Image: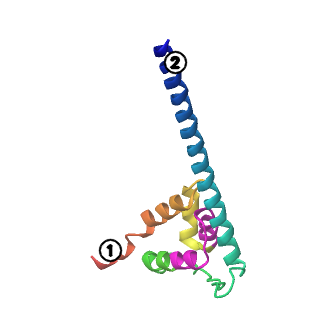
Amino acid sequence: MEGKFERQQKEVTSIMEQQTRYLREGIEATRRELEAQLAAVGARSRRAGGGGPGANSTTVKPPKFDSATSWAVFHRQFQVAAVQNNWTSNEKAPQLVSVLQGKAADILHTVPAEAKYEDIIGALQGHFGDQLAAVTT
């Protein structure tokens, strides 16, 4: 009788531990999701000038890129604007597309319309990234 009781007790303990783990994982996932949402709200608030006292509400306009200037210089300037404006990766893609002109804009024919920021940067880097090296060698 005692062995049966101990098995049942172990089974109940095991179930309780599984449920506790499951709840902790759910709580952790919810916490991460809420933190991400809070960060996004904070970024939007800062961009809108609502970040409170001392908040940085200066908007930096990224430069145009037509491939006449150095890719490295443009990319650095664009990154600075993205950081200053608190753009997310999803916001950077349309911003980048909007400043491409001439030969640089022609690259857009090689990437899908729904391309992510990293894909567009990769296409531009692949096409214009070695220009300086080719000129100096």
Q: Give the residue at the far top of this rendering.
A: 1
Identify the residue under disc 2.
Answer: 5
Residue at 52% over, 24% down? 9
Q: Give the residue at the far bottom of this rendering.
A: 54
Amino acid beneath label 1: Ala
Q: Which residues are magenta?
A: 78-98
Secondary structure of the residue carrying tag 2 is helix
Residue at 56% over, 44% down? 25
**Label number found at residue 66:** none
Residue at 56% over, 39% down? 20
Residue 51 location (% of width, % of height): 68, 80
Q: Give the residue at the far left of this rendering.
A: 137
Whether 129 is drawn above or below 58: the answer is above
Residue 130 location (% of width, % of height): 37, 70
Secondary structure of the residue carrying tag 1 is helix
Q: Nearer the viewer, residue 120 or 128?
A: 120
Q: Is residue 65 visible?
A: no
In the image, 15: left or right of 137?
right
Residue 116 location (% of width, % of height): 57, 57
Q: Nearer the viewer, residue 131 or 115?
A: 115
Please tell me whether the stretch drawn in magenta is mainly helix, strand or loop.
helix
**Label number found at residue 133:** 1
Amino acid beneath label 2: Phe
Upstream in sequence: badge 1 or badge 2 = 2
Q: Is residue 97 magenta?
A: yes
Q: Is residue 98 visible?
A: yes
Which quarter shows the C terminus?
Answer: bottom left
